[in-house]
Image (cartoon, helix red, strand yellow):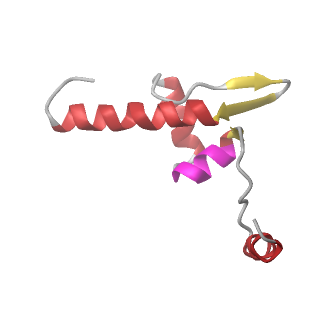
């Protein structure tokens, strides 16, 4: 990536560097959900897999992708009248 592009991202507050894991706050922002809803999903067993690194709770990029696929499959099943 060019320097100008990186500078523009910095100026706009865009984190363009790919990440391997996200904090709960980053995951929620990226998926347009509130932290409260994230915790509700976790409590109901419908949230993404998480990992603990010291005191931090992170969601890997793989867990995030799996969660999106699971949510899409659940939405499709619900539309088709299946119980999820």
Q: Name the residue rendered at 68%, 46% in the picture.
A: 25
> Residue placed farthest to the right in the image?
54
Q: Check the image and report above or below for 48 versus 5.
A: above
Whether residue 71 appears in magenta in the rendering, the answer is no
* Rendered image quadrant of residue 62: top right
> Residue placed farthest to the left in the image?
81
Dominant SS type (magenta): helix
Q: Which residues are magenta?
A: 25-32
Classify residue 84 as left or right of residue 4. left
User: Which percent across, then down, holds residue 8?
Assistant: 75, 76
* Rendered image quadrant of residue 17: bottom right
Total marks drawn? 0
> Residue placed farthest to the front in the image?
2
User: Which percent across, then down, holds residue 24?
Assistant: 67, 40
Quarter of the figure that contains the C terminus: top left
Whether residue 28 appears in magenta in the rendering, the answer is yes
Q: Check the image and report above or below for 54 versus 73.
A: above
* Rendered image quadrant of residue 48: top right
Quarter of the figure that contains the N terminus: bottom right
Q: Name the residue rendered at 45%, 38% in the picture.
A: 68
Q: Name the residue rendered at 38%, 35% in the picture.
A: 71
User: Which percent across, then down, holds residue 60?
Assistant: 65, 32
Classify residue 69 as left or right of residue 30. left
User: Which percent across, then down, holds residue 16?
Assistant: 71, 59
Classify residue 68 as left or right of residue 17. left
């Amino acid at each position: 990536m060019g320097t100008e592009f990186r500078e523009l991202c910095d100026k706009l507050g865009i984190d363009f560097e790919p990440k391997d894991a996200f904090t709960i706050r980053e995951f929620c922002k990226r998926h347009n959900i509130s932290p409260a809803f994230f915790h509700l999903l976790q409590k109901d067993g419908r949230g993404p897999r998480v990992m603990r690194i010291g005191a931090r709770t992170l969601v890997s990029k793989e867990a995030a992708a799996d969660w999106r696929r699971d949510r899409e499959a659940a939405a499709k099943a619900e539309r088709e009248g299946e119980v999820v």
